Amino acid sequence: MKDQMTTTNYLQFKGINYGESVTQKDLALLDGLFAPRNKQKTNRLLTAYYRANETLKKIVAKGDLSVNSLFFYQKISVDSYYFLGELLNGSDSKILNQLTMLSDSVELTNNIRTSNAIDTAIRQFSIAVEVFRITTGVESLEETSVEVFKQFIAPLRTEDNRWHPDLTPHAHKAIRYLARCFDNHLNSTDCLKLVELQRRDTRHKTKDLFDNPEKHMKAWVNSFHEFLNAKNAFETGHLKDRFTKFRNFLEFTYTSDFPSDPTLYFSKFRNDEFYNWLKDDRDKKSIGSSVLILTLTTIVDFSNWYIGEYMSETDETGELVTVGYPILSMHKFTQAVSEYGSEDNGKDIKLSESAKPTPPIWMILKLKEILTENDFAWPKSLSDQYNENIVDEDGNPIWIPVITYVYLVMLEIPIRKIQVIRLDSGEGDQWRYNPETDVWVKNDHQLTNYWKNIGAKVHNRGVLRRKLISGVLAPQFVFYINSNKVSDKEVGFSEKSGYEIPWKNATVIKYLDDLRDWQEKYNPVTYPVRFQDIPKTVFEAEPSESVLARIPDRFYLFRSAKDIKNGNCQMPPTNRNLHEFWVKLMAELERRLHSEGIECQIILTRNKTTNAPQSALYTPHGLRVAGLTSLAQQGVPIEVLSKIVAGHKSILMTIYYVKYHPSHITEILNEASRDIELDYQKSFQNWLKEAAWDEVAKYAAFNSSEAINSIKSDAAGCLVGLWNSTNLGICPYNGTRCHDGGKCIRKNGKKNTYLPVEDKNCVVCRHFITGLPWLTELWVHANSLILQSEKKAAEIQENEQVVQTLKVEQLTLRKKGQDVSPQLVTKLKKNETIQERLAIEEDKLFNALHSTHNLIEKIKNLPKPPISSVQGDSSDCVPALLMDSDSDFDIDYTETPNNFSNLDFVIQASRIYKHERNEDFERERDQFIDTILLRNGFEPMMLMNLTSEEKQQSADSFAKFLVTRFDGETLQLLKDGRKTFAELGIEQECSKAVPVQALQNIEIKASANQ
């Protein structure tokens, strides 16, 4: 060597051979071929790479240096890799084109679910082809042979014929498909044999996994090590062997979209897939029953530990709140042990370590039934729900409904137990709501105006609150929830704590109003209760003295009506009172399910002496179920969502502009205006790349401030050319961070744990950024979500009727003393499961609608971005008006008797916004049109002798005519046949509304049929 080496990276180079004529300076330049992957798009490093690549080519051309395939796939230093992506720039080799065409025959992208994963697979395959070409000199398939492939693959395999540890799972897969392509071409199986993973005994597979885990398993192995430490396991070998089986299951099941992080895997319900996989292995006699149960025990235990450690929190009531799904529920695990195990199996599982599950929606409906049927017969049967001092005129004890109503309220609206018992009755307010007349009247309680008289800032503190809204004459109704775990800190836990729910839920209003009447009659209050006087047995929290001093006094609505230890009957019931009622309710639920032939275990422990229930599988926190959670989110007014759920009317989101009032979406959107919109979006995107953090925050709309931080990150900088990858805004990560785009479930500095969002559901993602250029697309998307929500609500109602019919049939048989057939029980359970799935799907749609609404609201309040919206004259293009700084707008939700206007809005917008295309919407709109045509003596469009394009144009034009000429009520009359074109005097106009002149040619008057 001629010179002193100026770098040490060359000492780590693998897959390289060079002669003495190669200088240290030459090798130092080759350092530029390698860099961390997340920085390989920076200009400085790219310049260094191309300089180094030219040096490499020159030295190789001289014959002084050679490299093999490992040189390109190796990892040097801590995390530096070859610029593999640059191999494809400008590459148009013959063999790459040949193998790309051949890759379809080996199903390269089959069974891959997402477009991103498909792109990754194709890219990795192309890289493997280029590395093969460069290292072997083979330029076409005709030059290939098994020996040449063996020369390529040898450096990538270890002495014991396994993959070199520097290679990633993506590289393994790409090279395997390359081998299959060659075998396909050579009519051989020899190439694939060279890359097959050689089987070893279990002990060595386990040792490999834990000593040197591959990248996709590192997070799993690290978590399992933590689990073993937490168990204080003395002998870990057998536990690791069982975890290796779980690794095999993951790699077998997830050939693409591998869940490389436990949080990602446990954040979704996986339908008992690991248990089913083990059962299949047992059925094939690959494992015995003992191995199945021992393996299942270890992995269920691990999943419960992980969820408890990283995906759960304990709230101020001591309840365990979790967002994770264990490998198997405790009930099914017990069944598995019963079927495959012995009495010694399953003892490793500790119920206290497992997160409590949420009861299914059908079970929650059952709880409502137990609490309310036959005039509250079951809760009235409980002796501890009475106070000997509270009796009627005849001296009979009066039932205390307080605790029953706590849980009934929780079954109706998504608030926590502690929030319910903190609610104020409103006895000291100025106003009281009368549910029978739906009007606000002066409060006639002896303590009326209490808060006003003492000079408090908030005069009305009751849960039923009268709210005045600017521009609205009549006072509005809201539920006032006077505590909120998150936001109360911001207002110092003062009288301004809590939040409002603008939802006139008649059921909840009745519960609360009836309870106030009961309290005033049987447990009247004479003064508000100070929080600091309430014993710890009620709220269990121990606030600091400063917080205690700020928490307001309250007229508690849920007063216990029984003296509590260290307190009195004016205070809420203790946590023990609530718990004892709850486990009795769970025991009654279990009893009724057993009587219906449903095998389940809900009560986990009982008192050994009295047999009274002590603990249950479900907790009150689980009552905040899917199907209701979206109603508590900020965004679309809750009364709008409740109307969608009820299904009586259809909803259309409308945007009203100050300077422009379009009567139809086609007056806003066309091909020319779309081009301007795209130019504006591109300008906005380019401006974001250069803007400072505070400027971006000022002019952009986003779900989380983390999105603004991400724009300035190195990772986002590498992907700036791909930012505008969504239809509704910008994703700084090109759609690659859906796996952690959800809410934070555990805060730990830079290592916070986040839930995933559904693939490409950008509007709910914390990384997502949008703004004024995407306003129209967001508007269309919101109305598409409304349509989907309405359809989902209709499905729920239809299925609910089926469930009710089956329940009536079941009840009738029981009353007659007849047996209920297993088929009927199974049918009922299946439909209740469908109800659960539909409710969860509706909840997801509502959450997406909330997010879209909120983004539009934020855009409404943004200043105009400091960029040019269009080039040239745009006076005839409506979007230029919408982008003008003077074009203020308001959002409203209007009701119509049918969804025709919304269907037409979304469909005609989808002619430009292709991503909103929905064939179900088109079919429903066209059926609506055809019904009207038939009612008026015309042939329906579905029977017209037209091309698909002509039918689409005809339907669009006729729909526009109907929407712009008639309101929803008239359209409904036309559809029902209660009005005709002739009666409205528009027959001639109708004929002109269809561009292909179809209606004039195919009119079929009744007389012509005679």
Image: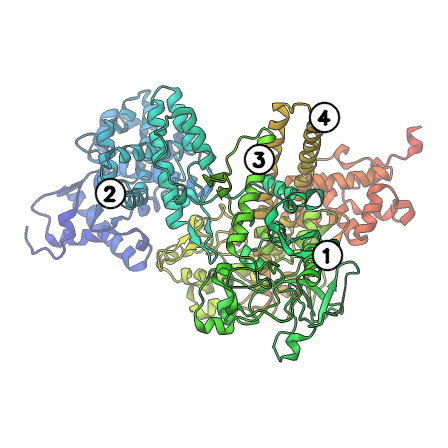
Alpha carbon of mark 2 to alpha carbon of mark 4: how far? 78 Å
Q: Amino acid at mark 3?
A: Arg
Name the residue nearer the viewer: 650 or 773: 650
Q: Disc 1 designates what residue?
A: 894
> In the rendered view, does 58 fall on the left or right side of 279?
left
x and y percent of residue 909 in the render?
65, 50
Q: Is residue 529 visible?
A: yes
The reply, left or right, for residue 743 in relation to residue 648 is left
Residue placed under numbered mark 4 in the picture: 816
- Identify residue for label 2: 72
Question: Disc number at residue 591?
Answer: 3
Which of the two labelled residues, at mark 2 and mark 3, occupies the earlier sequence position?
2
User: How far from the left and from the top, in percent, is residue 177?
Assistant: 34, 31
Residues packed near mark 1 inside 10 Å, few (<14), some (14 to 19) or many (20 plus): few
Q: Are marks 2 and 1 in contact (CB under 8 Å)?
A: no
Determine crowd level at label 2: few under 14, some 14-19, many 20+ residues with C-alpha closer than 10 A.
many
The answer to whether 904 appears left or right of 98 in the picture is right
Mark 2 or mark 4, which is nearer to you? 4
Amino acid at the residue labelled 1: Thr
Q: Is residue 467 left or right of residue 157?
A: right
- Mark 2 near mark 4, Cβ–Cβ under 8 Å? no
| Contact between labelled residues 4 and 3, with CB atoms less than 8 Å apart | no
Where residue 474 sits, quadrant-wise, is: bottom right
- Please state which amino acid type lies under the numbered disc 4: Lys
